[in-house]
Amino acid sequence: MTTRKHIHQIELAASPEEVFRLLITPSAIRGWWAASRAIVLAKEGGVWAAAWGDEDIPDYVTVYKIAAIEPPRQLFLTDTKYFAKTGQPPFDAKMTTEFTIEANGEGSILRVTQDGFPADAVADEFYAACEDGWRATFASIERYLSRNG
């Protein structure tokens, strides 16, 4: 199956260590991703999960397995599971999300690569929503760091 991916990056006025911490700290994830809850077992084979909405009946849940973690440079997430009240995406895919962080002067560059979207038209709407979502998420990370950095 042919797949496609998103690659987004942003320059941040924070050290790679600070940026990496915000990716693995549940309270920070709630702050920049507006999640109701987050759970991270920050080790290879661990879990990275976030949920939105009511605790007993969440609107949306995303869960990943941490396949690789190299502080403060890389967080590679696999075995992606999405759950939504409105239903599942209309396709089956093995998606991955990789965050990489590079030093950039006194700040850093945060890059995300989300891969595994089917090239079929059935995935177009979900693909476009994720693209918009990453732009909004990176803007939210920048705001979070300006308030809490």
Image (spheres, grey):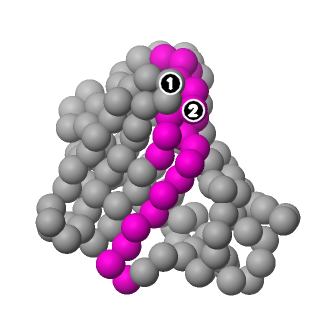
Q: Which residue lies furthest to the right in this view?
A: 2
Determine whether, in the image, residue 99 is placed left or right of residue 43.
right
Q: Is residue 66 above or below residue 34?
A: above
Residue 9 visible (yes or no):
no
Q: What residue type is labelled 1?
A: Glu
In this view, the residue in front, 24 or 10, is: 24
User: Residue 44 shows which numbered tag?
Assistant: 1
- Residue 66 falls inside the magenta stretch: yes
Q: Position of residue 31 (x, y in %)?
A: 23, 46
Give neighbour class at mark 2: few <14, some 14-19, many 20+ (Cα, 10 Å). some
Residue 116: percent from left, percent from top: 70, 57
| Residue found 37% across the figure and 73% down from its top | 84
Say which quarter of the image contains residue 55. Answer: bottom left
Q: Residue at x 45, y 63 (%)?
A: 82
Q: Label 2, label 1: how many angstroms apart (C-alpha)? A: 5 Å
- Tell which circle, 2 or 1, labels the residue nearer the N-terminal end: 1
Q: In the rendered image, which residue does mark 2 sit on?
A: 67
Residue located 40% across and 37% down the image? 47
| Looking at the image, residue 34 lies above or below residue 32 | below
Which part of the image, by quadrant, shows the C terminus? top left
Helix, strand or loop at mark 2: strand
Image quarter hosting the N terminus: bottom right
Could you tell me the amino acid type at mark 2?
A: Ala
Q: For the image shown, how many numbered marks are present on the structure?
A: 2
Tell me the chief SS of the magenta region: strand
Residue under the point 48% across and 76% down: 88
Residue 7 spot, x, y in % from top left: 66, 50
Q: Do the residues labelled 2 and 1 touch (CB within 8 Å)?
A: yes
- Label 1: few (<14), some (14–19) or many (≥20) C-alpha neighbours in 10 Å: some
The residue segment tinted magenta is: 64-86
Q: Where is residue 100 in the image (x, y as percent from the top left)?
A: 59, 31
